[in-house]
Structure formats: structure tokens, C-alpha cells
Image (tube, grey):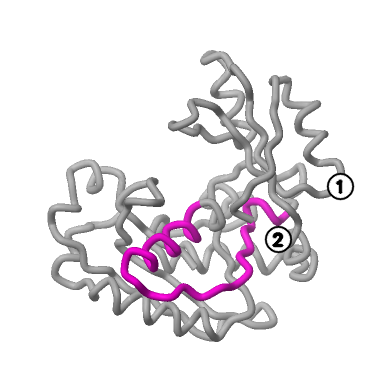
Amino acid sequence: LDLETTSLDTENCKILEVGVARFTNKEIIDMNSWLVYQDQSYLTDEVKKISKFKVDMVVEHGYQEDAVIKRLNKVLECVDYVVAYNGRSYDKQVYLNTCKRLGIQSVDRLWVDPLQDIDFGPDIFGRKLVHVAAEHGFVNPFPHRALFDVVTMLKIYFNYDEDVVISNAKAPTVKIYAINLPFARKDEAKTRGYKWDADKKVWYLEMRNLGNNVSKECNECGFSTKVVTNENN
């Protein structure tokens, strides 16, 4: 699953495009992609600037938002779990908040996030999907279009042991906060995969608590850290 939206604000953003594919035994069964109608007022200059496709298309060609969510739910009802890149902290929250706003019952499934649940090993340095794809030997020709991102993600996902990844996805999640990190070290934090929490004004890294990986990160990062169990497992 992949969602393209108007912003990174998971509570207030609007969905512009949905891409979803079902698979079994590392073979894709079917694929669907829907543009989501949004009023022109949501398509600000900033949205048009950050989007990687002509978002004006949603006005003329988009389906009604509630119809798309209902279609998506019919797909989710037929699967064992959902795979979404950076999905638990973003796509899942957007989906749940959209369902709540529309008064539609969400479908409860395990969410698997390759960004957190796959151990890419020391040879994969990137963390953005386009970089991870390149480091797996191929290029996504249309990044940030929902269905292409889904297929790109699955091509990566199929390289790894599904049972191990699902087991990782069921492990508890923590956030490691870099306390009082100097501005001069922000690039260092970004390189290690830390993200900026604008509300709390702090850099953080979300990861699965597997073995000693959390303590290892705290020891190796060189930052003053605080570890908090994430409620959005």
C-alpha cells in the first residue's frame, strides 16, 4: 500500500492517490490505483511544488474520497497483513484518520514496514525508497506515484525472508530521541535515519526493539538519548 497526500501532517492531510497490490508467494496477484478527488482549494502552490505528479488531475479524474476508502477496505479485508514503506508512522495514520473523519470503519491488520522491519545489512546505506531500490540494483522510473512505489517496494521486499520480516513487525517499537542535539549535527542525525519532530523540537529514530539493536544505537550514535516505547505499534 502507498498513499500520496497533500502534506506530511497525518491528522489533517488529504489523500491524492492510492496504490495497492495483493501478492502471494512473492508473486503479485493484482494491482489497483485510484486518484482521489479533492477540491481545488487543497491543491495549494506548496502541494503542487512538493508533489511529483500533476495534482490538478485529481479535480477532473479523481474518485470521491469515501468511495476510494471503501474500495481500499475491500482489498484490506482480503489480505493477511499490509506492507507499506514508512507505513506505520505515516500511511497507517493517514488511513486511520481519514476513516475516522469519513465515519468509515477501518480494517484492522498487522502493518509491516520494510523501513523498520527489514535488516538491510551494512551494504545498503540509503533509507529513502528510491535510494534503497538503486542499492538493490534497479531504478523506480516513476517515484512518488503510488502504484509504482508499491511495486518498487515489493521488488525489494521479495528479496527477504517473509517469516523473519513479519516476526520483526510484531516486535515492540521504540523511539530514540536525540536530546539537545546541536544544530550543527543535524546532518549527522539525518544520515543515521533520524527524523525531526516539529512539535517536540527534537530529532528521533523509530525502530523495532530486537535483541540489542536499541542499546547499540544509543551507544554508537554519539548523541545524548532517551528511549520511549511507541504507542503506535
For the C terminus, which image quadrant? bottom right
Residue 169: assigned label = 2
Q: Which residues are magenta?
A: 90-118
Residue 13 pos. (x, y %) = 32, 52
Q: Is residue 92 magenta?
A: yes
Residue 150 pos. (x, y %) = 50, 66
Residue 184 left/right relative to 13: right
Q: Please report the residue visible at 38 percent of the width from the left and 65 percent of the height from the top.
A: 100
Q: Secondary structure at mark 2?
A: helix
Q: Is residue 211 magenta?
A: no
Residue 33 left/right relative to 134: left
Residue 212 pos. (x, y %) = 86, 41
Q: Which quadrant of the structure image shows residue 215? A: top right
Residue 211: assigned label = 1
In depth, the one of 25 and 14 nearer the eye is: 14
Please name the amino acid that badge 1 sits on: Gly
Q: Please report the residue visible at 45 percent of the width from the left and 63 percent of the height from the top.
A: 96
Cα distance between the residues tagged 2 and 1: 14 Å
Q: Please report the residue visible at 62 percent of the width from the left and 74 percent of the height from the top.
A: 81
Residue 167 pos. (x, y %) = 78, 64
Q: Please report the residue visible at 43 percent of the width from the left and 59 percent of the height from the top.
A: 141
Residue 99: assigned label = none
Q: Secondary structure at mark 1?
A: loop
Mark 1 crowdedness (10 Å alpha carbons): few <14, some 14-19, many ≥20: few
Nearer the N terminus, badge 2 or badge 1?
Answer: 2
Depicted 77 relative to depicted 40: above or below: below
In depth, the one of 119 and 194 nearer the eye is: 194
Q: Which quadrant of the structure image shows residue 206? A: top right
Q: How many marks?
A: 2
